[in-house]
């Protein structure tokens, strides 16, 4: 019996959870799918007389994946594919190895995962999340997704007094400045650049460069603060980032963001817990806006969001909560 951690070798968030698990004497098997030395050296799946699975590792350790008590997954294992530059026979062999590696993991009770990557893939959709959030009674700012540029202009014109923001629909890690792609961490420009939310203004767009890419525009909400509410099963840990004049639209671009613990109204907290449950997840970092009328506007749920910055900045025991959740998964 053990807790399985699937994450990059240097993932600090996983390190924090592993530290708490180790203090409780919980056996841990950690796999970094990008490092061959971390993957099982042998895989066996037996169907008779009962299904049995086993991994053997280079260190001599063995594991039956179906008997793990919990899985912390911070890697998109469902997207593992052979290297495209490999030769056909190598690509086939690698595809078989990936399929054999994933088969026992698919057998693990979804209730043990934080989060089940195959469920997470479906849930990581902003439009779907907004649909569920509104059905639960959460306020969601009006938005539009369209491939038609004239629709975007009309939406902007209709909300010219409040303004609109432009957001990415996907989590694609591309950003373009002056028609050249650069790394997201290098972005400092004020105009829209994926993946950050920014003000939208049709006047700065050269229509000759506009293509038919789907675009998401959303009503801009005057805000007092950004709220990051991390849900772990039935527990919620909220932090506030006060909005000041001149602050970026997207608080992730703030170099020295101010963070402090925040107590959500119980009604809002319960709806967020229910939202994450309806997404069939056990963890999500939910982003909201505290508006000028002290109302709450739901933006999105980051299904694999980072939490250490709120844990450390606001003193929230999120890593401990995740460790406890891995040791005590809900029965399903």
Image: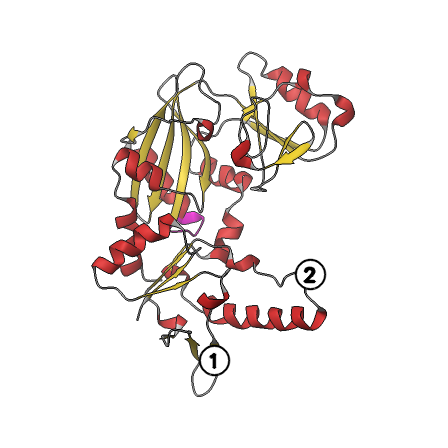
Task: Name the residue tied to disc 1.
Answer: 44
Query: First in sequence: mark 1 or mark 2?
Result: 1
Q: Where is residue 206 drawn, in percent x and y?
A: 73, 21
Q: Is residue 132 above or below residue 114?
A: above
Q: Is residue 144 left or right of residue 280?
A: right
Give the class, few, some or many, for how many residues have Cα within 10 Å of label 2's Cα (few <14, many ≥20): few
Dominant secondary structure, magenta: loop
Q: Where is residue 53 drawn, in percent x and y?
A: 43, 77
What is the count of numbered marks?
Answer: 2
Q: Where is residue 279 drawn, in percent x and y?
A: 45, 48
Q: Residue at x 35, y 68 (%)?
A: 68
| Observer able to see residue 26 | yes
Q: Is residue 208 left or right of residue 106?
A: right
Nearer to the camera, 112 or 254: 254
Q: Give the quadrant of the C terminus.
A: bottom left
**How was the colour assigned to the protein in this rendering?**
secondary structure
**Does the magenta run of residues contain 14?**
no
Nearer to the camera, 11 or 293: 11
Instruction: Give the CA separation, mark 1 to mark 2.
Output: 28 Å
Query: Of tags 1 and 2, which is closer to the observer?
Result: 2
**Does the magenta run of residues contain 280?**
yes
Q: Residue at x 27, y 31 (%)?
A: 263
Q: Quadrant of residue 54?
A: bottom left
Nearer to the camera, 113 or 207: 207
Kind of element beneath mark 1: strand
Q: Which residues are magenta?
A: 277-282
Q: Quadrant of residue 259?
A: top left
Task: Name the residue tied to disc 2.
Answer: 85
């Amino acid at each position: 019996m053990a807790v399985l951690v699937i994450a990059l070798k240097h993932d600090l968030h996983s390190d924090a959870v592993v530290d708490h698990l180790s203090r409780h004497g919980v056996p841990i098997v950690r796999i970094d799918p990008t490092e061959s030395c971390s993957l099982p050296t042998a895989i066996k799946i037996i169907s008779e007389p009962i299904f049995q699975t086993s991994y053997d590792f280079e260190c001599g350790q063995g594991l039956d994946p179906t008997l793990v008590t919990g899985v912390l997954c911070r890697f998109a294992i469902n997207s593992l594919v052979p290297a495209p530059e490999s030769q056909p026979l190598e690509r086939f062999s690698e595809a078989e190895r990936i399929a054999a590696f994933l088969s026992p993991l698919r057998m693990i009770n979804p209730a043990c995962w934080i989060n089940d990557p195959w469920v997470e893939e479906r849930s990581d959709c902003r439009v779907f999340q907004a649909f569920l959030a509104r059905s639960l009674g959460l306020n969601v700012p009006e938005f539009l997704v369209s491939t038609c540029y004239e629709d975007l202009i009309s939406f902007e014109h209709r909300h010219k007094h409040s303004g609109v923001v432009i957001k990415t629909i996907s989590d694609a890690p591309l950003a373009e400045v002056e028609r050249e792609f650069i790394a997201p961490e290098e972005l400092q420009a004020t105009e829209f650049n994926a993946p950050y939310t920014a003000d939208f203004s049709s006047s700065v767009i050269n229509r000759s460069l506009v293509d038919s890419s789907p675009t998401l525009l959303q009503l801009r909400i005057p805000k007092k603060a950004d709220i990051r509410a991390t849900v772990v099963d039935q527990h919620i840990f909220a932090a506030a980032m006060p909005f000041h004049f001149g602050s970026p639209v997207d608080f992730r671009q703030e170099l020295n963001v101010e963070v402090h613990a925040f107590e959500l109204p119980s009604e809002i907290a319960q709806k967020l817990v229910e939202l994450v449950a309806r997404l069939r997840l056990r963890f999500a970092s939910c982003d909201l806006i505290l508006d000028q009328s002290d109302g709450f506007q739901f933006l999105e749920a980051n299904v694999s969001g980072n939490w250490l910055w709120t844990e450390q900045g606001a003193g929230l025991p999120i890593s401990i909560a995740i460790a406890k959740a891995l040791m005590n998964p809900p029965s399903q």
